[in-house]
Amino acid sequence: MDFFLYFCRNVKNMAETNHLVIMAGGVGSRFWPVSTPKKPKQFIDILGTGSSLLQLTVKRFEKVCDIEHVWVVTSARYKELVREQLPLLPESNILLEPCMRNTAPCIAYAAWKIKKRDAAANIIVSPADHIVTDVEEFRRVMEEGLFFTAGEDRILTVGMRPSRPETGYGYIKVKENTGEGEIREVEGFKEKPDRQTAEEYLRAGGYLWNSGIFVWNVATIEKAFRKEQPEIACIFDELEKDFYTPGEQEAVNRRFPECKNISIDYAVMEHVRNIYVFPADFGWSDLGTWGSLHELSEKDTDRNAVVGEGVRLVECKDCVVRVSPDKPMVLQGLEGYIVAEHNGVFLICKAEEEQRIKEFSSRLQE
């Protein structure tokens, strides 16, 4: 057979087994008051583009896998938000967590349910609230990652080349001169560092930001859970008979709370040996804070980033402002401030104090 035809057929066959799992259960408390427990940031048009972060996530994967192979794992209270924002998503692909148990149980639930339908599935796991500016490069990395893990016992994470000594991200240490092509073996994972350590990482080289995006085939992640987290694996083994039946949600509501509250990094990534990283640069941000929104957004000559048609700034510098379109306002003399509004609730605080936003919202609730 002609090699090109053989390659194209195999790529087509691979595409038919590609699945995307979107983790969309967080409450986004650091983006208060725009993000609230009732409607957290993944369901909000944070950037003023006309699409929520969840919708933008699905859109950038649209050439990587079909909508029938997209799975959204979220809190039970956000089911209607998902249905409203993703009307083409099959309802059986919305996986509802009855309580928060971190990313490991979330990923296991999706993996076991996908496995029952497609034992050859090749899976990308992505948070719902990331931003990517170079979508074509992003898709190239995802497609090469899927090719790397298809049919192989490999776990792949995506590492972003750091542009600054960021203290808000975990890091991945790369083994030099290992792996295949652009992909490298992982030497180890590092917790979010202090400023001095982050600067040392940047000077040393060989460190990447941990994006929290993973690629693997379903057999590999199942094997990893069975070895490293057998109690979680046992729970989903027992739940598997209920998947795709009318009794699924009731069974999940009963057993899911028994899962250990643990992240996928602690549960699996820090223990397995067959783990690789794809160093990438596609204009990525996890959009975890108002500061990251400021960094990502277009800014005026005074480095102000504004979302809101009625906002006028006078003698302001280094501010991030996001207010509703129907809230005209003039701000004067602010430097390094966050100004945010949602449904008539305002936050005005120094950007350097954004880590206290949870505290500020609690004071208002009191």
Image (spheres, rainbow, N blue to C red):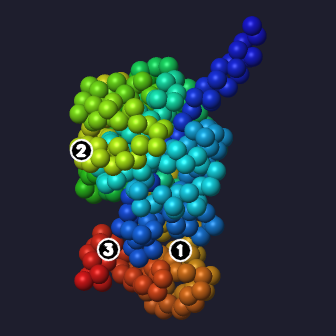
Left or right of 113? Residue 11 is right
Identify whether 339 is placed above or below 355.
below
Q: Residue furthest front?
A: 246
Rendering coords of residue 87 (x, y %): 62, 55
> With respect to residue 72, does 346 lie above or below?
below
Q: Which residue is mark 1?
A: 305
Q: Which is more N-terminal, label 1 or label 3?
A: 1
The quadrant of the image that shows the C terminus is: bottom left
At mark 1, the secondary structure is strand
Q: Earlier in the sequence, mark 3 or mark 2?
A: 2
Query: Is residue 162 visible to us here?
Result: no
Which residue is the site of mark 3? 357
Residue at image position (51%, 61%) is 80
| SS type, badge 3 | helix
Callout 1 crowding tier (Cα within 10 Å): few <14, some 14–19, many ≥20: many
Towards the viewer: 89 or 23: 89
The type of residue carrying mark 1 is Ala
Q: Are marks 3 and 1 in contact (CB under 8 Å)?
A: no
Q: Residue at x 37, y 51 (%)?
A: 97
Foreground tag (3 vs 2): 2
Task: Please provide percent x and percent y for residue 303.
Answer: 52, 74
In the rendered image, the vertical position of residue 184 relative to residue 40, given as above or below: above
Could you classify mark 2 by the number of other residues whose Cα lies within 10 Å: few (under 14), some (14-19), or many (20 or more)? Answer: some
Which three-letter amino acid code belongs to the residue tagged 3? Ile
Comparing labels 3 and 1, the label whose residue is closer to the camera: 3
Q: Nearer the viewer, residue 240 or 212?
A: 240
Q: Which mark is residue 25?
A: none
The kind of residue tagged 2 is: Glu
The quadrant holding residue 312 is bottom right
Q: Which mark is residue 258?
A: 2
Disc on the earlier residue, 2 or 1: 2
